[in-house]
Amino acid sequence: MGGDFGPHCIVPASLACLASFPSLHLTLVGQAPLLEELIARGRDVDRVRLRIQHAGEVIGMDERPAQALRGKPDSSMRVALELVRNGQARACVSAGNTGALMALSRYVLKTLPGIDRPAMVTAVPTEKGHCHLLDLGANVDCSAEHLYQFAVMGAVAAEALGIDRPRVALLNVGTEDVKGNQQVKLAASLLQQASGINYIGYVEGDGLFRGAADVVVCDGFVGNILLKSSEGLAAMISARMGELFRQGVVARMVGALALPFLRRLQADLAPARYNGASFLGLQGIVIKSHGSAGAESFQSAIRRALKEIEEDLPERLHGRLEHLLL
Amino acid sequence: MGGDFGPHCIVPASLACLASFPSLHLTLVGQAPLLEELIARGRDVDRVRLRIQHAGEVIGMDERPAQALRGKPDSSMRVALELVRNGQARACVSAGNTGALMALSRYVLKTLPGIDRPAMVTAVPTEKGHCHLLDLGANVDCSAEHLYQFAVMGAVAAEALGIDRPRVALLNVGTEDVKGNQQVKLAASLLQQASGINYIGYVEGDGLFRGAADVVVCDGFVGNILLKSSEGLAAMISARMGELFRQGVVARMVGALALPFLRRLQADLAPARYNGASFLGLQGIVIKSHGSAGAESFQSAIRRALKEIEEDLPERLHGRLEHLLL
């Protein structure tokens, strides 16, 4: 029920994914009459693999996490997470209120042993491919231990997604040892001592986009600002480019020719919007799709869930954490 | 003597500025024989307005600030700052080691009354124009009081640069009151109580680039990462665009036509590189040009110094701070 477009976007995305992945079973959680109505608009829907689970309440996009936790036992978000906890679903995908989703996920699913706080991770495009950036806003005040746990979780997730011995770096204001705040310096010394983690040191903001690391770790305050400012900058570049291409006849011709190229580029540059973010460190799989995501992006969030199910990411994380953290 | 290209870039930039601004007097501080040699390559140099002050030592780009403070009494950076302190110069412009420049500036010039730490500010391009972002890396751990002082300094500087009642915002992970870490929330309540500051609340990373505020305040860790990642993203976009425009004949034609437009855009998007950053809160004017800046960007750093001299920014700040802070 969440996200800026709610089920009007989520239902078509779900139907498209059902058609693409013959082994996929989906349960849509929310207000049954509305969901039925939207499903009826689809063609050739395989209802054997599409269930509806009614949930009467909806958590608003601006509702406080604490309110969502206490006030709404029958919210679509909570019911969906309970399906995961009870083994009736393997993963939960939501475009709803991020803070509420995180709070409910922790409450309903619990964290893995050794993990204080789950982290939010997404793939950010770089000059060489992608890097996995975490945390993205779940934790605004982080200790060195939290950063260390994020690094471990990011490394394991990157491995599960196919990167061999992922290069793990801490985001910092310089690459020299003396640079940074206390938490970052302490986290660096924890990571230097950890075996089984390919820790490569500090990376700066520009190094991240140059592809200097496969996993980049920071606190949620910094990660959130980095991600949103990157989205803002990419949008600004598109807007300015549009303006440039409207000035004069020649520019307009160039613009018309360049447009398809620029669109492709822009699509690749709105990271969270297009990839979905994953919550790491929970006893279950939870994927957060961007609130303003369209149907296509919601599909990629479902694909991310499928990938994590295939790799059994929580179990894999659990195994590695026992070695690295306990 | 500093920066990636040293006087080979700074001397030509200085000569160009001398020619453009008939009232400008410049003192080049550094190794006199080298400086003389580079000046001799220029044409029609008005030596009445161009002095050389010999300084035998150079601070390396990777040298620690503490080392620069203690070890090199005759560094070009320190001698230049002493000229400002002694009234022999109105401003110091350097492309050298940022940390060393900040440490030496504080030691030689001292901060204004009421200011604990100077901040680094630069103009970042937005959809609507520019916003003044501070701090950019001078202070990695900031209290609410520091953020408040940065906000006051940023507002006064923006006013001096021609913005009427600049909209001042705190950079945060959300726009609701409950969002953010302790320092940011406390700084918000300090700013809400301050009279004479047009405080508009929180702004997010994307809001910054949309032009939601004229002055955006954050700690130096966040500001440094935001600025460097923006530069990195802009560089990545250029690189990817170049690749796109090399694929196939049509793309190459479009690329050839689009290139001048894209260059113009890129130039506007590498903020610190092109504008220079200003140190605020000192008893004197210090402008930091980007280390890898070319001659053109060093000229814009000199122009920024001229603007701050015209507006007598330190004195203006001092007057406002007396009302707002003491």
Image (cartoon, coloured by chain):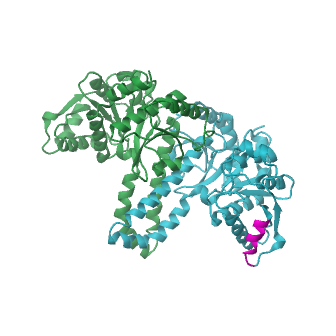
Chain colours: A cyan, B green
Work out whether residue B282 or residue A320 is closer to the camera in this orientation and state it. B282
Work out whether residue B56 or residue A309 is closer to the camera in this orientation and state it. A309
User: Would you say residue B124 sits in the magenta stretch?
Assistant: no
Question: Outermost residue, bottom direction?
Answer: A44
Question: Which quadrant of the figure contains the C terminus of chain B?
Answer: top left
Main secondary-structure element of the magenta-colored stretch: helix
**Residue B138 position within the rendered picture, expressed as x and y whole percent measured from the top left:** 46, 32
Any part of residue B60 in sight: no
Give the residue at x 79% y 56%: A80
Residue A183 quadrant: top right
**Residue A277 position within the rendered picture, expressed as x and y whole percent measured from the top left:** 66, 54
Give the residue at x 46% y 56%: A236
Q: Is residue A270 left or right of residue A20?
A: left
Residue A124 quadrant: bottom right
User: Would you say residue A36 sits in the magenta stretch?
Assistant: yes
- Magenta region: A33-43
Work out whether residue A226 or residue B293 is closer to the camera in this orientation and state it. A226
Q: Is residue A127 left or right of residue A184?
A: left
**Residue B281 position within the rendered picture, expressed as x and y whole percent measured from the top left:** 39, 28
Any part of residue A119 in sight: yes
Question: Which quadrant of the figure contains the N terminus of chain B?
Answer: top left
